[in-house]
Amino acid sequence: MNCVRTYVICLCCVFLLSLAMQAENVSARNLEALQEAAEQGDATAQFVLGAFYLGGHGVPKDDDMALQWLRKSAEQANAEAQFALGALYTAGRSVPQDYAKAVQWFQKAAEQGDTDAQSILGAVYLLGQGVPKDERKGAQWFKKAADQGNAAAQTVMGGLYYLGWGMPRDRQAGCGLLRASAGQGYTKAIELYKVCAADKTDIPLDELETRLHDEIVKLVKSAEALGAVQ
C-alpha cells in the first residue's frame, strides 16, 4: 500500500471516529423519535442514526445497520452520509475495500460543495491514486475547496498556482492564496508564505521552487492538507 492510499485511509479513519463522537454527543436525544423520523425518510435522521450505530452510542454497535442507514441517507443526497460511505469503502469497514466506489461517493459529496471531499478528489487526481492521473482536474477540485475558504486547500492551491502545477503559473495569485490561508492561522501556509515572499530576495529561483514543490507534495499527501474532520 503506497503512501497516498495510506493518507486517504488515515483521513477516513479520522472521519469515522468523528461520526462516533457525534453520536456520543447527541445520544441523549429521543432515539425512538429519531428512529421514527429515519423510517419516514428524513435524510438527516438517517445519517445521525447511522452514526449512532457506527459508534454504538444509545444503540448496540452495528456496522451493518450503520451502513444501511448511511446508504439510505446518501441516496437522498445527504453530503455527510455520502462522505461517510466514501470513508467506509476506503477503510474497508462494513464493506469490502473498494477504492473506486469510495471515489464515486466522495465525488457525489464534492459536487454538493463538501470541501473535504473536494480536497480528497483534488489529491487523488493530482497524484493519480484510484483514478487516472489528471493534474488539471486535481487542481480544479482543490480550487473549489479553496474558493469556499478551506485554509488547507488554499495552501495547496497557492503552491499549485506558484509552481504552475495543473494550471498556468501565476505567482501573484499563489502568494495571495498563501497569504489568505496564513491569515486564518494555518501554520503550514504561514511557513510557505515566508518562502513565497522570499522570491524577492537573493534566494536562487530553482532552490525556491524546489522548496515550495516539496512542501506542497507533503501537504497533498497528508490528511491535514485535506482538511480532515476534527
Image (cartoon, rainbow, N blue to C red):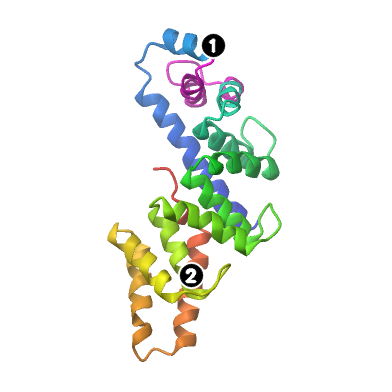
- Residue 207 visible in the picture: yes
Q: Amino acid at mark 1?
A: Glu
- Rendered location of residue 39, percent (x, y): 54, 11
Residue at image coords 42%, 25%: 23
Task: Judge whether residue 59 is colored magenta.
Answer: yes
SS assignment at label 2: helix
Residue matched to label 2: 161
- Could you tell whether 198 is left or right of 36 in the image? left
Is 207 placed above or below 24 here?
Answer: below
Residue matched to label 1: 39
Please name whichever residue, 52 or 153, is drawn nearer the observer in this view of the structure: 153
- Rendered location of residue 112, percent (x, y): 52, 39
SS assignment at label 1: helix
Residue at image coords 44%, 50%: 227
Question: What span is in magenta?
Answer: 41-67
Disc on the earlier residue, 2 or 1 = 1
Is 114 placed above or below 202 here?
Answer: above
